[in-house]
Structures are given as C-alpha cells and as structure tokens.
Amino acid sequence: MGSVTGSVGLAGCEWLQYDYRAGLLAADPPESFTMWRYRGLLPVPDGPVRYPVPVGGTPLLPVPGLRQALGTPRLWVKDETRNPTASNKDRATALVIEDGLRRGVDTVTTASTGNAAVSTAVGAAAAGLRAVIFVSPSCRPEKVARMAQAGAWVLQVPEGYAAAVDLSRAAARAFGWLDRNTGVNPVTLEAKKTVAFEVWEQLGRVVPDVVVAPVGDGPTLVALDKGFAELVDCGLATRRPRLVGVQAARCQPLVRAWQGRPAGSGELDPGATAADGIAVLRPAIGDAVLDAVGRTGGELVAVGEDDLRRAVDGLAARAGVGAEPAGAAALAGLEAVLATGAVDRLETTVLLVTGRGGAGPAAPGGPDRVLVTDSLGAVERALSGSR
C-alpha cells in the first residue's frame, strides 16, 4: 500500500497526500478489476479487504450510436450504473465501511437525496453494520423503501436536506458512528477518485481531453480532479483533463456562482427537477468544485428538464445504458458545451453516468423503520434498543 503522508486543504476540502511514485499503480492486467486495485493510493492498511461486495471496475463504453448521432468519434461513457446499487455512491460506501470494519464501529450514518443512502443501507447490510439514514421529506418513496428493505433506519427531517446533513453529522459525533456524509469525510473523495484511475487505464493509460460529470454536492467532480492530479504526481501523466460540471437548470447554485450572478426565480428549487440526485441547494464542497473547474479550464453548465429527458432516452436508445435524470445529466451537458464550442467534437471526451436509481420499486421495509425526527434527543429515543 502507499503511505498517507498527511493532508492539505484545498478550497475548503481536505485532500489526503501519499508518497507518490509510479509503482503505486499496478501495470499488470488485473485478475479482478475492482476499486481495490488502486489501494496503493487509498488509505487502506495492509491485509485483506473486509468489505464483502465487489465495487468499481465499471466499463468504459465506446457507444458507436452516440458517437454517430453527435459527431463525436472519440466519445466514451463510463457506466457507473454497473455498481452493486447502480450508482457511483458505492465506491465511497465501500471505503468508509472498510475503515469502520477495521476500527470496530458498528453503525454508519449519512444524509442523502437518495442514491448515497441506498448505497449505505445495502453496504451496511452486507457488512453486518447498522445504518441510520437521514433524508428530507421529498426523498423519493421508492428510494426510502429500498433503504428500509435493506434494514436501515430512515429518519425524515422536516426542515429538508441541509438540516438532514447537519443532524446526521451531529449524531455521528455524539454517538461515535461512522460519518459517510459526502464531501465531509475525506475518505469519500479517496474512493471516488478511483474512477479517474480506471478511465486512464481503460484508455490505454492515457488521460482524456474532457470529462463531463453531474454535480450536486460536488465530491464526484472534485474526486476526478484529485485522481487525475495524482496520476501527474506519480509521473504517469503530464496533464489533467478539462472538467465540465452539469446541474439542473431548476437547481443550479454552482452554475450561478461560476457565472458570478445571482440565481433567478425558479433556479434554486430542488423539488422542481427530476434530477433529484443533483438537486442540492447548499453543495457540501461547492468552493472546491469551482476551484477544480477553473484550474482545469473547464465549464459549469445548467440543463433543462426537456434536455434531461432527452438524455435519458438517448443513453438508452444509443448506448444501451439505463440512467435516471441525474445520472444522464452528463449527456445533456455535453450537448450544451458542444453547441457553444467549449468542447470540440473531435476531442477525447468521457461522460460519467453516475446512477440508474434502482431497478424499480422496492417492497416496503416496514413503517416502523421510517420515522420523523428533528433533534438528537429524538434520534436517541427512536433508536433506543435498536439494531
């Protein structure tokens, strides 16, 4: 394994540092292609991995139908829907729980708009831990059902997602739980950066020109920046790709910050977009997103609801990839930057499809596992004697 030598603060975000060298990334073909292939650049001590579910190693698809339709002969789709719960959130869940298993922690918590919570619930069930999930009342019922079905305790916070994050973090501190909250625990970035390593390796150890990714709280895009930066630090690449972040037009706080102008009426309404997975009013590491996009010469764009629907249909019909609107936002964003000329059609471009949103409604997990709470005292009372 590589040695964590410390950490640095970057735009309000903690980046773990390693003793960078080329040998930390294996050159031989993997026997089993998962995110643990890159443990030399992960904060994982020696010894067998304890997390029981294979994660990562998702395909990079050449998508000839999309290439022809868009006139982009070097377009690729990184399909993160192939992960265990059909989203890239499984990477962060795996590394956070791996850390908890090694430290003997028995409960993991997070707040989420949906996919991270489902991932945490399923991952905790597989690892034998208790999951306590905090969500807003607007979290989609089918996702809440999947969490409860996996045995998680789901606590709905009436004040909304930002309040759910605050209460989850307070509970983690008060009760000694694992904090899997996105962008807060630096381990979540470490896990998600493995997407960059995989893309580089799948392209023949070459960095693409552009990577387009949906942006909600921000860790997915910031982790890509960190991953490609570490390839440079290891002497395995000479540059980073330009990063293009995509938000829904009806909830676009970072796009407006990037453009330097206040959001207008209807541009900060999480409940008004089908892309619930990126509908975040208070991005956890928004400053780091703006920094990464700026340093790489990238762009932040907003896309409309019709654009998102067309992207979902386009991925299905021309790439064979099923995606929810938030997961398909990268395709809608690519079409926007192709139209403005910010991305050239002949550049090597990778779209990150982050999630599918599940295979359909889950069976109810029992109403006793879905509770309403608004304080630490209420959390403690609700979970008294539970496992």
Image (tube, rainbow, N blue to C red):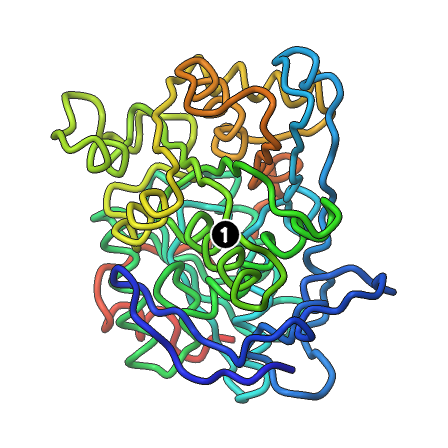
Residue at the image point whose x is 28% and y is 31% from the top: 251
Residue, x 78% and y 59% (percent of image)? 33
Element under disc 1: helix
Q: Quadrant of residue 7?
A: bottom left
Mark 1 packing: few (<14 Cα in 10 Å), some, or many (20+)?
Answer: many
Q: For this rendering, which residue is in front, 186 or 107? A: 186
Q: Say above or below: 371 vs 249.
A: below
Using the image as rendered, state which of residue 135 and residue 149 is in the foreground: 135
Residue annotated with mark 1: 224
In the displayed structure, 5 sits above or below 168; it is below
Q: Nearer the viewer, residue 187 or 337?
A: 337
Side of 23 where 330 appears, left or right: left
Does 342 appear above or below 179?
Answer: above
Residue 315 in view in this figure: yes
In the rendered view, does 313 fall on the left or right side of 307? right
Residue 320: x, y in percent? 74, 25
